[in-house]
Amino acid sequence: MSGAETVSADATETSAGFKAIGEQQYFAEFFEQFDAIADEMKLHLDDGGLFGIVVDPANVGMCRDSLDREALEHYSATGGVIGLNLSRILDILGMGNSEDLVELELDTETRKLHIQVDGLSYTLALIDPDSIRKEPEIPDDLDLPATMTVDFADLKRGITAADMVSDHIRFRTGTSEEGKLAVYVEAEGDTDDVDLELTHEKLVAIDAEPGDGDSLFSLDYLKDIKKPIPKDAEVRIELGEEHPIKFHYGHTEMGDGGLAGDCTVMLAPRVQSD
Amino acid sequence: MSGAETVSADATETSAGFKAIGEQQYFAEFFEQFDAIADEMKLHLDDGGLFGIVVDPANVGMCRDSLDREALEHYSATGGVIGLNLSRILDILGMGNSEDLVELELDTETRKLHIQVDGLSYTLALIDPDSIRKEPEIPDDLDLPATMTVDFADLKRGITAADMVSDHIRFRTGTSEEGKLAVYVEAEGDTDDVDLELTHEKLVAIDAEPGDGDSLFSLDYLKDIKKPIPKDAEVRIELGEEHPIKFHYGHTEMGDGGLAGDCTVMLAPRVQSD
Amino acid sequence: MSGAETVSADATETSAGFKAIGEQQYFAEFFEQFDAIADEMKLHLDDGGLFGIVVDPANVGMCRDSLDREALEHYSATGGVIGLNLSRILDILGMGNSEDLVELELDTETRKLHIQVDGLSYTLALIDPDSIRKEPEIPDDLDLPATMTVDFADLKRGITAADMVSDHIRFRTGTSEEGKLAVYVEAEGDTDDVDLELTHEKLVAIDAEPGDGDSLFSLDYLKDIKKPIPKDAEVRIELGEEHPIKFHYGHTEMGDGGLAGDCTVMLAPRVQSD
C-alpha cells in the first residue's frame, strides 16, 4: 500500500491537475468500502494512485483503501486532496456497468469533478476538505498476535448467524477437537447462542506461530463493512485480546494477476463491562 | 401418518434423548406449514419421526404435519414433547441450503436444542410446552363428501385471483358445460367477480362418487397457508356444505419415490349470515 | 393510427357487441401506457381495433394509444365506448403470461366486461364514461421542428441520470465536437449537473433538415411514462423551443413484422420563469 506514506500534513492543499480513466468496477469497489463507514471522504490524488482513510463519527470503524494507478488505463495526478460525497459518486458510477470505462477529471478552476460514463457527463461539486472529519491514524503496532486468513464467505456466514441472536459478535482463537488451531465466531443472545467454528482445514492461511485472540465487536458495524467485500475475497484477520480487529483484503485482480489496490478495515472492540 | 396415533395426553412430559440428522429441505418444509398458522408449536419426538398439530388463536386454521424418520439420515428419539418458536428455527434452517445436512440434538440437561448447519452451531432455548396453546383435534368424521385432487398451481391461481376482488373465497362442486363434475373457485367483490373453473380434465383425481360441496372461507388464512406448499404438489381437497375444508399434501419426494411426511391443513368455514 | 379518426362526439353512447381474443402481451402493453398517466380511461371499441386518449389531472401528460385488430386472434366490435379502471384490468391481465390467450367480452345487459385468462373468469364492473375526465386533443400542428429517433435505452439512461441531480430535464438539439447534429439530455441540480450527449452516430434516425429544439420538462412525469415502453423500442422524439415534447413508439412486433398498435405520449413543457 504505497499510498499510505503520502498522507501528509498538508491534506488541505488545493490539488492541481488530475485525470483518471479506468474500468467502473475498480472505482466502484474503491469507494464502496469508504461509504460503509463515512458519508464524505478526503480523496488523495497521489502519484501512485488514489488513496484515502476515513473514520465513522463514533470513532469505532476505520477504513484505509488504495487504488493503484497500474489498475487504470490512464492516470495523471500532481498531488493534492479533494473532498467527495461518497453516495453521490457511487450513484454516478452506478450508471455504468463493471467493465465500462469511466473518466474522472478535475476542473481546477471551478473546483468540480467531471465524470464520464459511456456518453454521460456528470459534474460533481466538491466538498472543502477542511470541512471533512480529520483522517485517523490506523496504527500498525497494535498487539494483534492472532493472524489468519479466511474465505470471506465463511466470515459473512458467521456475521449473518450472529445477527440472529445478538447485537455483538466475538472472534476468538481456540483449539478444535482435533487439537488444532481454529477460529471461533460466536454470539450470545438473551436466550440463544450461535457459534461458527472455522477449523484448521477451513482457514486459508495461519501465521507460523499465531498468538491468542479474543475480542467482542458491534454487529452494526460489521454488517455494513461486509457489504462491499468481493464475494470471492480472502480476508486476513488480525486479532488480539480485547483489542481492535483488522480485516485486510485486496481489490479485484487484474488480467495479469496483480491487485488493483488493497483495503484495511479496523474496528474498535466493545468493552466487556459485565 | 403414523405419528398421529402418538399424540398422547402426556404431551407435557419432558423428553429424553433426541437427535436427528437430515437434509435441510425436509426440516424446513415441515416447520414452514406450522409457521403459516402459529408462532409456537409443541414438537412431538415420536418413535416414527417428528410430529405436531397447531391451531391459530382464532381457532380457524389448523395444521397437522409429520416428518418420517425414513426421510432422515439419522433419527433417534425416546418420545416426549418440546416447545419451539417457529420463526426462530426457520431462521436458523435458512442459514443452510436445501441439501445441506442439518443436525438437531436435544441437550436434556440445559433443555436447549443444538442445531448444526455446515459448521455453524446454534443453541436454541426451548419453550415450556405447557405455555403453548393446547393442540386441537382435527376430526376425521366431518361430513366432507366432495373429495378431489388438484394441482397446487391451479389452487394457488384461484386464491390469487379471488384476492383481487374480495376477502372471501368459495369452493364448490358443480357441473361443467360438458356435463361433467367440476370444481369452482369463486369470489364476489362489491363490483367485480372472479371465477375459476377446474374442469374434469384439469382435476388430478376425483372420488368415485363424490358428494356436493359448497363453502366459503377467509382469504387471509388461505393466503398464508398456500405459501409453504411445494410448487409441484398435488393437493387433495375435502369439501362439504358450509363445513370446514381440508387440504392434504405430501412432502418432498425422496430418491426412492417415498414421501418425507404428510400434511393436513383444515380451515373453518365463514358463516354466511346474509 | 387509423383509430384516431373514430373519436366521435358521441363518446358516451352505449356500446353494442364487443369481443376480442388475443395474446396477453398486446392487451397489457396497450393498457400500461395509459395507466402511467391516468387511473381511468374511455376505451373506444372501434371497427379497426381498440383506441383511447387520456390526460393526467394537471393536464401535463397525455397518451394516445391503439391496438389494431390485426394483432388479435379475434375481434368484433360494433363501436361504442366503455369506461375502465386501468389498474383493475392490468391486475387481471397480470394473472396470465405474455403469450396466454385472453378474451374480453362485453355483456351488454349487465354492462360488465367478462375477461377470461386460462380458465379464470373475471367480471369487471364498468365505469360510466361520462364520469371520466374528458379526452384531450393531441394537436398535430405544434411547432416541433426537431425530429429524431433514439434507442429507448439511451432515453431511459438520460432520465435516470437526470433524476440523480434535479426534478427537471432539458432536451435540446445542438452540434457535437465533430460538427454534426446531436441531441443533449441535460439536468442542472443545485450543485451537480448531468449531461448525456446522443451523437449523430447514436441516433437511430434524424429528419432530413431538422430544426432546433430546446425545452424543459418535469422528471416526475417522464419517470412514469418510461416504465411501460418496451426495452428494445425505438422512440421518435418531436421537440421544439419551449414547446411540448412528443414521444412516439410502436407496440410489440407481430410474427409478420407488423405492429400491434402505436402510441404517442405528449408532455407539456415547464415554463422557465427564472
Image (spheres, coloured by chain):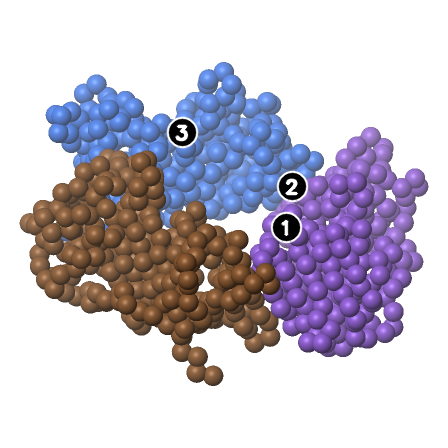
Chain colours: A brown, B purple, C blue
Q: Residue at x 76, y 38 (%)?
A: B198
**Mark-to-mark CA distance, 1 and 3:** 42 Å
The numbered dot on residue A79 is none
- SS state under label 3: loop
User: Given the image, on which type of amino acid does mark 2 rest?
Assistant: Tyr
User: Given the image, on which type of amino acid does mark 3 rest?
Assistant: Asp
**Mark-to-mark CA distance, 2 and 1:** 44 Å
Asked if disc 2 and disc 1 are in contact, CB closer than 8 Å, the reply is: no
The chain containing the residue under callout 3 comes to C
The numbered dot on residue C232 is 3
Q: Quadrant of residue B266?
A: bottom right
**Structural crowding at the residue carrying mark 3, measured as other residues with C-alpha within 10 Å and reported as few (<14), some (14–19) or many (≥20):** few
- SS state under label 1: loop
Disc nearer the start of the sequence (2/3): 2
Q: Which residue is mark 2?
A: C122
Q: Which residue is mark 1?
A: B100
Q: Is residue B265 left or right of residue C162?
A: right
